[in-house]
Amino acid sequence: MADSFGWDLMYKVSENDLKKKEDVLTLVIHYVIIKNGFRCVGLGDDKTLAGTETTSELLPNGWNSAECYALRYSREQDLFILKGVPVDDALVYNFMRVKSLAVSTVAFNVEGTVKATNGPLETLIPSFDEIMKQIKTDLLDPLKISSSNKEVETQTATPLPPRPDHPISDPDIPRFMPPQPLHPTNPLFGSDPDRDPLRVGGRDLDPFGVGGGNIFNPFNPRGGIPDPGAGIPGGLPRGAIPPGARFDPFGPPGAGGFGGRGPRRPPDFDPGSMFL
């Protein structure tokens, strides 16, 4: 159902001016124009707008005194001219936007549209829903005239991306986890990876882990390089092992040969005989 708010007041003011059915139809068109933000600035077809005209929502005196209808309207500093001309059994209305000279047209069969000249709107024009929609569609929309009621725009807040210091609760989003050692610290060997047999090879398996790749770690600045001649009486002579060569010690590191902890040498043992 079309919104007819304000019609009763407008009809009450103009009721005594309605002499024929063409007047009722013109009043309905005036009502739709006013509801869309226009104000009437008088009679005639003068195409100039001084800006000092008195505007009103009501029709001016003498609006239906001639055979044809000619009314001037303003909206947002634009001037519009409405003309209603009888053509046979119809009444043709032209609505011109003076600035662009654009013209829209709507026509109604008077006898088929208007049924009475006084009474409620349903009595005057039983199909007033369709008539008001047609006025809006054919007379106002072609001139790109929108309704005066501003549409309320709903703004949807855009969620902000999570800050780096806020935890991410979505399990599908990968999170950075600090590297964890492959093996826990063995309490028997402390935190030294070179002395913990459970962590041998940790560097080979985990590039972020700690611990050497071998038991013998020549790059360990803490323990130094074990004595390769450990376990040999008297040790190895200087230069016996080329620099950088891989050489497994003969005995456990720190054993210091067999002196003190290993079996005693026979009195007649000749150390040089082992090189013969």
Image (cartoon, rainbow, N blue to C red):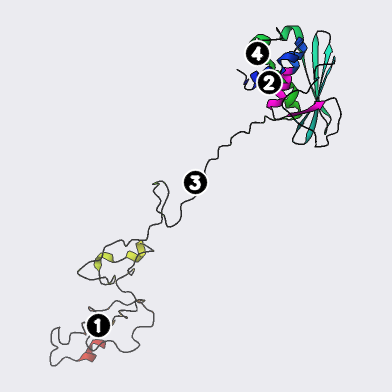
**x, y percent for residue 269:** 16, 91
**x, y percent for residue 192:** 27, 72
Q: Earlier in the sequence, mark 2 or mark 4?
A: 2
Answer whether residue 234 is visible to the viewer in this image: yes
Q: How many marks?
A: 4
Could you tell whether 153 is left or right of 51 in the image? left
Distance Cα–Cα, label 2 vs label 1 = 118 Å
Q: Residue 260 falls in which quadrant of the image?
A: bottom left
Boundaries of the magenta span? 27-43
Secondary structure of residue under mark 4: helix
Q: Residue 166 falls in which quadrant of the image?
A: bottom left
Circles 1 and 3 in contact, beta carbons < 8 Å: no
Answer whether residue 276 is visible to the viewer in this image: no
Task: State the residue at coordinates (32%, 70%).
Answer: 214
Q: Nearer the viewer, residue 229 or 148?
A: 148
Query: Looking at the picture, which amino acid does disc 2 mark?
Result: Met
**x, y percent for residue 187:** 21, 68
Q: Tell us which disc is closer to us: 3 or 2.
A: 2
Q: Nearer the viewer, residue 194 or 131?
A: 131
Query: Looking at the picture, which amino acid does disc 1 mark?
Result: Ala
Residue wearing tag 4: 121
Q: Earlier in the sequence, mark 1 or mark 4?
A: 4
| Label number found at residue 230 | 1
Q: Earlier in the sequence, mark 2 or mark 1?
A: 2
Circles 3 and 4 in contact, beta carbons < 8 Å: no
| Label number found at residue 159 | 3
